[in-house]
Image: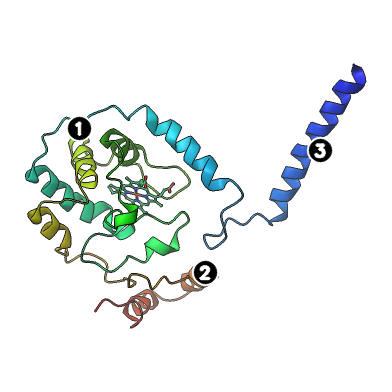
Amino acid sequence: MRGFVLGVFVTLVIIVGSAYLLLRSGKVSLATTAEPLPLEKELVQLTLDANVRSAKDKTNPLPETDENMLAAAKEFKEHCVFCHGAPGRLRPPLATMMMPKPPQLFDKDNMVTDDPEGEIFWIISNGIRLSGMPGFGDHLEEKERWQIAMLLKHADKLPAAVQAELERKEPREMAMHVKPGEEHEPERGQMHEHKHEPAHATEHVQESPHEHEH
Ligand code: HEC
């Protein structure tokens, strides 16, 4: 019996020790350009599903009106568009610079129209840790978060006025865009180089013909 217990203990020490050494070695890349780790996507999805499940049955307390969705379209352009894109725009650079990539919530294959509105509301309110998706619980009113959940739920059948509002660009929106399909891989070390350049260097990047919106 003592031998068995010792065996289990030694095995555990070896497993934990190997994991520690592997992580310390730097071979597990946290670069946004690296492939996902084995089972990373599956484990995150499993955890996220379990998190949002409790919100599944929460229904939107607001009436489904153009007015609510119009308000949401304005909020979306202010807080979400530079990651999640919107109709009538070129794809925002952040859509490809992050890992996981922010889904383009108005692209057919990325829409969340099949998800319960309560779950969308949960994600907007709480965010998703370690992904870059911010939690807006303290930043947007509860009503505004429900309005945006309503907008995303109806992304495939938006009233014309809401669609037009989403397409209408705000003057302050970033001019820096990448064309759909023209995914650009940020060069390794790019961020680091810019840190040491004068402020106008950033403007220069935005104005390069490759990324400029036409
Ligand atoms: C800084 C970039 C960023 C901003 C700003 C941002 N998000 Fe996200 N969002 C992400 C990323 C990255 C993910 C993917 C997370 C993942 O896959 O785990 C995400 C995921 C989501 C999802 C889940 C999509 C799905 O397929 O389940 C929803 C819904 C969402 N965001 C809504 C919003 C809304 C609404 C706003 C604005 C109020 C917003 N996000 C602002 C980066 C962002």
Real-space Cα separation, disc 2 to disc 1, in angstroms: 44 Å
Considering only vertical position in the picture, is 64 above or below 169? above
* Numbered circle sitting on residue 192: 2
Amino acid of disc 1? Asn
Q: Which residue is mark 3?
A: 14
Of badges 3 and 2, nearer the viewer stands: 3
Amino acid of disc 2? His
Task: Determine the secondary structure under disc 2.
Answer: helix
Determine whether, in the image, residue 188 is placed left or right of residue 6: left
Q: At 17% across and 65% down in the image, what residue appears?
A: 169
Q: Are marks 2 and 1 in contact (CB under 8 Å)?
A: no
- Image location (x, y in percent) of residue 162: 12, 53
Determine whether, in the image, residue 205 is placed left or right of residue 4: left
Q: Quadrant of the C terminus?
A: bottom left
Q: Quadrant of residue 83?
A: bottom left
Which of pointers 2 and 1 lies earlier in the amino acid sequence? 1
- Image location (x, y in percent) of residue 67: 7, 44
Q: Residue furthest top?
A: 1
Real-space Cα separation, disc 3 to disc 2, in angstroms: 37 Å
Q: Which residue is mark 1?
A: 60
Q: Residue furthest bottom?
A: 209
